[in-house]
């Protein structure tokens, strides 16, 4: 995501977190990296929206 910057390390290497039922084959086909898959049914109020792929920081 070009418009997002990590609030911890200022990196622009940021991705939006993905949620929902995912299958390994689907992740592979779409090029989804495991680092930004957030699980099946997290709480909307507390789940992070973004992850920094440089430092691993997650935020809303």
Image (tube, rainbow, N blue to C red):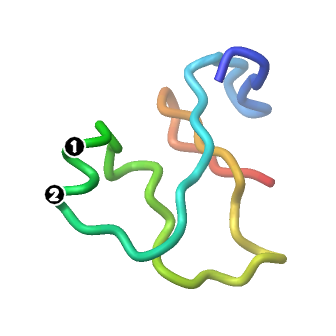
Q: Residues within 10 Å of mark 2 (few under 14, many from 20)?
A: few
Residue 42 occupies quadrant: bottom right
Residue 46 point in image, percent of width and height = 77, 75
Q: Quadrant of the C terminus?
A: bottom right
Front residue (pair 57, 15): 15
Q: Which secondary structure, mark 2?
A: helix
Residue 54 point in image, percent of width and height = 49, 27
Residue 1 occupies quadrant: top right
Label 2 belongs to which residue? 25
Position of 48 compared to 39: left or right? right
Label 1 belongs to which residue? 29
Position of 1 compared to 23: left or right? right
Q: Residue at x 27, y 52 (%)?
A: 27
Q: Residue at x 76, y 25 (%)?
A: 4
Q: Residues within 10 Å of mark 1 (few under 14, many from 20)?
A: few
Count of numbered labels shown in the rendering? 2
Q: Is residue 28 above or below residue 15?
A: below
Q: CA distance from mark 2 to mark 1?
A: 6 Å
Q: Residue at x 31, y 41 (%)?
A: 30
Position of 37 compared to 16: left or right? left
Tell whether label 1 touches label 2 (CB within 8 Å). yes
Front residue (pair 4, 20): 20
Residue 28 point in image, percent of width and height = 20, 46
Q: Is residue 27 above or below residue 41?
A: above
Q: Which secondary structure, mark 1?
A: helix
Q: Residue furthest left?
A: 25
């Amino acid at each position: 995501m070009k418009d997002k910057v990590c609030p911890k390390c200022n990196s622009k290497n940021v991705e939006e977190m993905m949620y929902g039922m995912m299958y390994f084959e689907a992740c592979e086909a779409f090029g989804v990296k495991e680092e930004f898959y957030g699980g099946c049914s997290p709480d909307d109020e507390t789940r992070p929206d973004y992850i920094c792929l440089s430092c691993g920081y997650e935020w809303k």
